[in-house]
């Protein structure tokens, strides 16, 4: 009897895990995402270049970043949406974000987003984030629930989309459409 | 400080603004005690508009620098609004603060939502050493400049480690988004507060300066931490504040900057408007139990 109960509980737990993870193994999906993010950054740093060093001259900083961005655009000309955020990874992110929004701190996160001067821009892979548009601040609790990124890459929210941004080159590497749940 | 390749038209515009402001200087009335071995600095937030009002505040700052002898400024974010071309750095920072920079005053910037989180840390006059968040010490006061736009796990862990290892008598944090804020435009950042407050309380932070809300606010201490909101050194929103018992002082009729002096166990402050009027001032003991701040100007 005990054996049967243990088996039944284990089966229920497995089914529940499969339901919450949409049938895929979350650890594997996260590992795959982290590998793809690292691959992009390694490629960019070795093939294209790194961020410049601090200087007194804003002209030099701006020129260095523009050069970096142009090289990324040329070298990655055929890049398409979904190369880093594959459909499986994107679904994982959507589930995690929805769970965070529906969780204990969801109300605070929504309030923080509302107060952070949200902006709407047209997203295109390999394009620069518009210089004159403020970057929307990203709620810390949301960041803490997403896989950590290597220095040089960051998440940004634009409307309901989650953007993966190359912060050194100011390039939109990839994005997930409707990553954030609809506003209540 | 050399302004690099400033176009002629820009220099002419700046000269015109400075000339127009030349006759508007008010009487300097320093209320800081200017004690020996004290740490003195100025605070500006949401400053980088490049417009006339920013220049007027900068002009008052220079007048007060001569009298109060502060040698550094902390910036609470939105240091450069709009574009980030070299001309923007000139018009929104280098030219208005040229007299201060020429006098050797150092600026320590934190990032706001209108700032470029990659370009500005690389700009040496902001003293960020290429980092979004960093710390520096001035005698017995340690400062922690944070990036509240992107408070991720590495930053939180760095903050905890740095605060824990700090032996400074005073710990002062500055960042853009206010944890407490009675202004009606933005309000407090509740999620940020949720993540930051436990660290600030645990490791004995004494004072927090923030911007974002385009007005001046001094809040009553919460858990022995003093909170100032100062997001009006360039931008100004003449909006109402919430009628709240949390506000110790507030002002939204003109742009301001803050003068601060930390001497022993006391922090003295003076909030000065663009016309040179002192709108708030007082002395705060390090343990926030007994606040002896002067009455609010509001």
Image (cartoon, coloured by chain):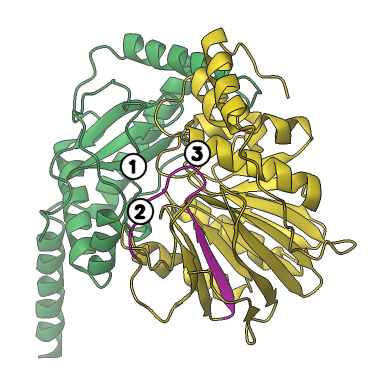
Chain colours: A green, B yellow
Q: Is mark 1 on a helix, strand or loop?
A: strand
Q: What is the chain letter for disc 3?
A: B
Q: Which quadrant holds the N terminus of chain B?
A: top right
Q: Is mark 3 on a helix, strand or loop?
A: helix
Q: Specify few, some or many for label 3: CA neighbours under 10 Å numbering under 14, 14-19, or 20 or more.
A: many
In this figure, which residue is indicated by the disc labeled 2?
A143
Are the residues tagged 2 and 1 within 8 Å (C-beta)?
A: yes
**Residue range (magenta):** B224-240
Residue B225: within the magenta? yes
Q: What is the chain letter for disc 2?
A: A
Q: Where is residue A132 in the image (x, y as percent from the top left)?
A: 35, 28
Residue at (82% x, 72% y) in the render: B264
Q: Specify few, some or many for label 2: CA neighbours under 10 Å numbering under 14, 14-19, or 20 or more.
A: many
Q: Is residue B190 left or right of residue A67?
A: left
- Point out which mark residue B53 bears: 3
Image label count: 3
Q: Seen from this angle, which residue lies furthest front?
A: B23
Residue nearest the viewer, comparing B121 with B97: B97
Residue at (31% x, 51% y) in the render: A116
Q: Is mark 2 on a helix, strand or loop?
A: helix
Give the label, 3 or 2, closer to the camera.
Answer: 3
Q: Is the magenta stretch mostly helix, strand or loop?
A: loop
In this figure, which residue is indicated by the disc labeled 1?
A155
* Above or below, B188 relative to A48: below
Are the residues tagged 3 and 2 within 8 Å (C-beta)?
A: no
Sequence-first disc among 2 and 1: 2
Q: Specify few, some or many for label 1: CA neighbours under 10 Å numbering under 14, 14-19, or 20 or more.
A: many
Residue A24: within the magenta? no
Q: Where is residue A108 in the image (x, y as percent from the top left)?
A: 28, 67
Q: In this view, does B249 lie to the left or right of A17?
A: right
Q: How far apart are marks 2 and 1 (CA)?
A: 8 Å
């Amino acid at each position: 009897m005990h054996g049967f109960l243990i088996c039944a509980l284990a089966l229920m737990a497995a089914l529940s895990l499969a339901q919450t993870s949409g049938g895929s193994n979350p650890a594997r999906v996260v590992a795959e995402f982290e590998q793809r993010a690292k691959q992009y950054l390694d490629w960019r740093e070795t093939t294209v270049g790194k961020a410049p060093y601090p200087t007194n001259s804003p002209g030099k900083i701006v020129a260095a970043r523009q050069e970096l961005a142009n090289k990324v655009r040329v070298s990655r000309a055929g890049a398409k949406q979904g190369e880093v955020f594959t459909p499986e990874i994107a679904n994982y992110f959507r589930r995690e974000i929805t769970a965070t929004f529906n969780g204990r701190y969801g109300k605070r996160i929504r309030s923080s987003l509302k107060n952070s001067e949200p902006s709407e821009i047209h997203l295109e892979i390999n394009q620069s984030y518009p210089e004159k548009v403020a970057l929307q601040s990203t709620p810390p609790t949301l960041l803490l629930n997403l896989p950590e990124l290597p220095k040089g890459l960051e998440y940004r929210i634009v409307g309901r989309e989650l953007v993966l941004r190359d912060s050194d080159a100011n390039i939109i590497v990839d994005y997930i459409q409707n990553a954030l749940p609809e506003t209540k | 400080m050399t302004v690099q390749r400033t176009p002629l038209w820009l220099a002419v515009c700046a000269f015109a603004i400075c000339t127009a402001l030349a006759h508007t200087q008010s009487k300097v009335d320093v209320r800081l005690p200017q004690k020996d071995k004290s740490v003195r600095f100025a605070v500006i937030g949401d400053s980088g508009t490049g417009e006339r009002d920013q220049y007027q505040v900068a002009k008052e700052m220079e007048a007060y620098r001569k009298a109060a002898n502060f040698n550094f400024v902390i910036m609470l974010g939105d240091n450069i609004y709009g574009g980030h071309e070299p001309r923007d750095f000139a018009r929104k920072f280098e030219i208005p603060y040229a007299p201060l920079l020429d006098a050797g005053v150092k600026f320590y910037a934190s990032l706001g939502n209108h700032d470029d989180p990659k370009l500005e840390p690389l700009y040496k006059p902001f003293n960020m050493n290429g980092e979004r968040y960093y710390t520096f010490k001035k005698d017995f006061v340690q400062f922690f400049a944070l990036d509240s736009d992107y408070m991720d796990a590495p930053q939180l862990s760095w903050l905890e480690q740095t605060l824990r290892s700090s032996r400074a008598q005073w710990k002062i944090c500055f960042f853009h988004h206010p944890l407490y804020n009675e202004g009606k435009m933005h309000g407090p950042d509740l999620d940020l507060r949720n993540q930051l407050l436990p660290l600030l309380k645990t490791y004995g932070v004494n004072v927090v300066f923030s911007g974002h809300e385009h007005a001046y606010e001094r809040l009553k201490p919460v858990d022995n931490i003093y909170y100032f909101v100062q997001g009006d050194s360039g931008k100004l929103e003449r909006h109402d504040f919430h009628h709240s018992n949390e506000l110790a002082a507030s002002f939204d009729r003109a742009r301001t900057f803050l003068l601060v002096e930390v001497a022993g166990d006391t922090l003295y402050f003076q909030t000065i408007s663009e016309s040179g009027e002192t709108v708030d001032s007082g002395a705060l003991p390090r343990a926030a139990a007994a606040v002896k701040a002067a009455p609010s100007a509001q």
